[in-house]
């Protein structure tokens, strides 16, 4: 577990009407996220501005979001919740909420109104997919490929099924070491209609069909667990193509200037946001609520897009998305929601994976071990 700690000097905080006073709030927070470019965007857009206003607060980062469900289960079992705010994907938020491990909240009570005067509930709209999920960004999982490794005479890959075409596009692939997205892409490229994917995947036969399709490239796959893996594998030329989060690919393409390009076809849209663990002491909960209200307001979510190509979850934030903070390039064309990038998207089914994740995970890991 990797931690980065930021300590600032202690000063007094003036109490505001209707908000817990400084004496009622903890001076420390442990935030859980994914590391890399995404966590850095949170640090720059949310945490640093918050700490400028609250220099008495100490923030510790824990990069364990990919293990959030298992770890929160264990903490709850032990009666020792050490995390204060956890960044998770929407399907994990639904699971944690269903299990009573994430706190339910009222958007109008916890979250700020939009800068355009809209209520928080209207501003976030359908992004609030669970009573416990506090949306931050819309992102996608998609593929990047080495432009200098495209075979002579072949067009650049632009179809999701090119991933399964080893004859035209030989070379190693990088795929995430979990069934999510891989199973959907496999069925899509095995002839299943997009609107029937989850009906098929709900059956043992459909799950086996997906695994059989993945079997056709299994020997050429390097499996990744951390979001930084595929960008590094691409940068090192160890794989021809690989899946990862679009923000990670933006970083390797635009910030590192590597010979890598995006393949947006069948990008899988997903949501990422916060959950507050249940059972926090009152002083820690008060601090978390104060931070969340600030960190999810219109300006802060728009500011995050200065550092990473993820779309803000608030409608009122979208018009404020501008240039990258360091590169000076317009960020709108790099968003997964940009119309040119979103001609053929795949909408992730949060509820399906909340219901089926454990069973399919077990089957997928067994298949990997074969």
Image (cartoon, helix red, strand yellow):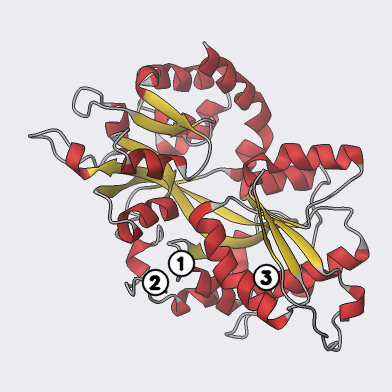
Mark 2 or mark 1: name the one nearer the start of the chain: 1
Quadrant of residue 156 within the rendered picture:
top left
- Give the numbered dot on residue 195: none
Is residue 127 shown to the viewer in this render? yes
User: Alpha-carbon distance for marks 3 and 2?
Assistant: 28 Å
User: Alpha-carbon distance for marks 3 and 1?
Assistant: 26 Å
Q: Is residue 271 left or right of residue 11?
A: left
Q: How many marks?
A: 3
Find numbered disc 3 in the image and state the secondary structure of the residue it sits on: helix
Residue tagged by mark 1? 307
Residue tagged by mark 2? 324
Find numbered disc 1 in the image and state the secondary structure of the residue it sits on: loop
- Give the numbered dot on residue 121: 3
Q: Residue at x 32, y 53 (%)?
A: 343
Q: Is residue 10 above or below residue 282?
A: below
Mark 3 or mark 2: name the one nearer the start of the chain: 3
Q: Residue at x 56, y 71 (%)?
A: 45
Which residue extends farthest left?
Answer: 153
Is residue 126 shown to the viewer in this render? no
Q: What is the x, y in percent for residue 23?
A: 92, 78
Q: Residue at x 53, y 30 (%)?
A: 179
Q: What is the x, y in percent for residue 337?
A: 41, 60
Mark 3 or mark 1: name the one nearer the start of the chain: 3
Q: Is residue 163 left or right of residue 103?
A: left
Q: Residue at x 43, y 16 (%)?
A: 212
**In the rendered structure, are the residues bearing label 2 and label 1 in contact, judged by CB atoms less than 8 Å apart?**
yes
Q: Is residue 57 left or right of residue 222?
A: right
Q: What is the x, y in percent for residue 254?
A: 32, 60
């Amino acid at each position: 577990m990797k931690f980065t700690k930021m300590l600032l000097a202690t000063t007094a905080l003036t109490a505001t009407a209707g908000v817990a006073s400084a004496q009622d709030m903890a001076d420390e927070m442990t935030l859980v996220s994914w590391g890399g470019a995404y966590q850095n965007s949170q640090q720059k857009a949310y945490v640093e501005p918050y700490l400028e206003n609250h220099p008495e607060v100490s923030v510790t980062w824990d990069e364990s979001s990919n293990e959030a469900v298992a770890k929160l289960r264990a903490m709850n079992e032990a009666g020792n919740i050490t995390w204060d705010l956890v960044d998770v994907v929407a399907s994990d938020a639904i699971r944690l909420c269903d299990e009573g491990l994430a706190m339910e909240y009222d958007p109008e009570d916890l979250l700020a109104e939009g800068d355009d005067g809209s209520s928080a509930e209207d501003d976030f709209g359908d992004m609030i997919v669970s009573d416990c999920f506090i949306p931050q960004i819309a992102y996608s999982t998609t593929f990047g490929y080495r432009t200098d490794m495209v075979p002579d005479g072949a067009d650049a890959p632009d179809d999701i099924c090119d991933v399964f075409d080893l004859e035209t596009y030989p070379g190693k692939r990088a795929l995430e070491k979990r069934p999510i997205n891989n199973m959907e892409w496999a069925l899509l490229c095995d002839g299943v209609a997009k609107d029937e994917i989850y009906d098929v995947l709900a059956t043992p036969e459909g799950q086996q069909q997906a695994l059989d399709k993945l079997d056709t490239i299994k020997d050429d796959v390097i499996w990744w667990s951390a979001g930084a893996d595929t960008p590094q594998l691409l940068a090192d030329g160890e794989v021809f193509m690989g899946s990862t989060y679009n923000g990670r690919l933006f970083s390797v393409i635009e910030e590192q200037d590597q010979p890598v390009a995006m393949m947006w076809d069948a990008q899988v849209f997903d949501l990422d946001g916060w959950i507050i663990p249940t059972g926090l002491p009152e002083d820690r909960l008060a601090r978390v609520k104060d931070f969340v209200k600030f960190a999810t307001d219109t300006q802060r979510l728009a500011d995050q897009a200065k550092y990473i190509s993820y779309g803000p979850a608030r409608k009122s934030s979208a018009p404020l998305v501008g240039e990258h903070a360091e590169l000076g390039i317009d960020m709108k064309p790099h968003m997964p929601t940009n119309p040119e990038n979103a001609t053929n998207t795949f909408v992730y089914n949060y509820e399906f994976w909340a219901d089926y994740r454990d069973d399919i995970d077990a089957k997928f890991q067994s298949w990997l071990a074969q």
